[in-house]
Image: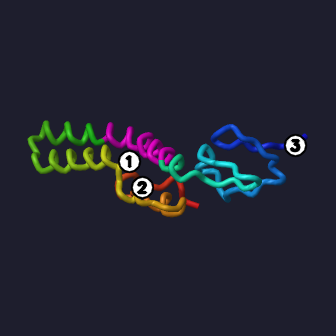
């Protein structure tokens, strides 16, 4: 039985004859050219942004609690800090580091661990 690999466009190649990326983080961005599988950077950026959206969902919910507690306590500085954090979370997928990344390594490095926590792309 021959194992095949399919790229993002549905093209298939025998796994035994393919040269492919070292990791599978952006598997859905793989593109086939002859026997070489590479990562389509534009597609990888979209996958990366989707991962940010997935992670930030629970972070935004937790920050809503922080904001409500600050509101109930009348702590305007805590309200402002919480609102700023929520804005940063909402803006995270549009970060310049993502837009400017010209390699997969730079894209992975664009994960803001301060804001989003541990990167899912650590090797």
Image color mode: rainbow
Q: Residue at x 80, y 43 (%)?
A: 4
Residue 11 inside the magenta-drawn segment: no
Q: Which mark is residue 2?
A: 3
Mark 2: few/some/many CA within 10 Å (<14, 14-19, 20+): many
**Residue located beneath label 1 in the image:** 93
Residue 48 inside the magenta-drawn segment: yes
Q: Which residues are magenta?
A: 46-62
Between 31 and 2, the one nearer to me in the picture: 31
Contact between marks 1 and 2 (CB within 8 A): the answer is: yes
Q: Which mark is residue 77?
A: none
Q: Which mark is residue 98?
A: 2
Q: Residue at x 38, y 43 (%)?
A: 56
Q: Quadrant of residue 97?
A: bottom left
Where residue 82 appears, as percent x and y from the top left, is 22, 46
Where residue 6 appears, as percent x and y from the top left, is 72, 41
Q: Residue at x 53, y 63 (%)?
A: 105
| Distance between mark 3 and mark 2 Cα atoms | 37 Å
């Amino acid at each position: 039985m021959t194992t095949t690999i399919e790229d993002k466009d549905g093209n298939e190649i025998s796994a035994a004859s393919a040269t492919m990326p070292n990791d599978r983080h952006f598997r859905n961005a793989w593109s086939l050219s002859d026997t070489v599988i590479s990562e389509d950077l534009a597609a990888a950026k979209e996958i990366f942004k989707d991962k940010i959206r997935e992670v930030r969902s629970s972070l935004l919910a937790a920050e809503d609690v922080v904001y409500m507690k600050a509101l109930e306590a009348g702590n305007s500085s805590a309200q402002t800090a919480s609102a700023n954090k929520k804005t940063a979370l909402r803006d995270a997928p549009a970060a310049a580091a993502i837009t400017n990344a010209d390699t997969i390594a730079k894209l992975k490095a664009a994960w803001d661990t301060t804001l989003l926590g541990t990167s899912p792309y650590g090797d």
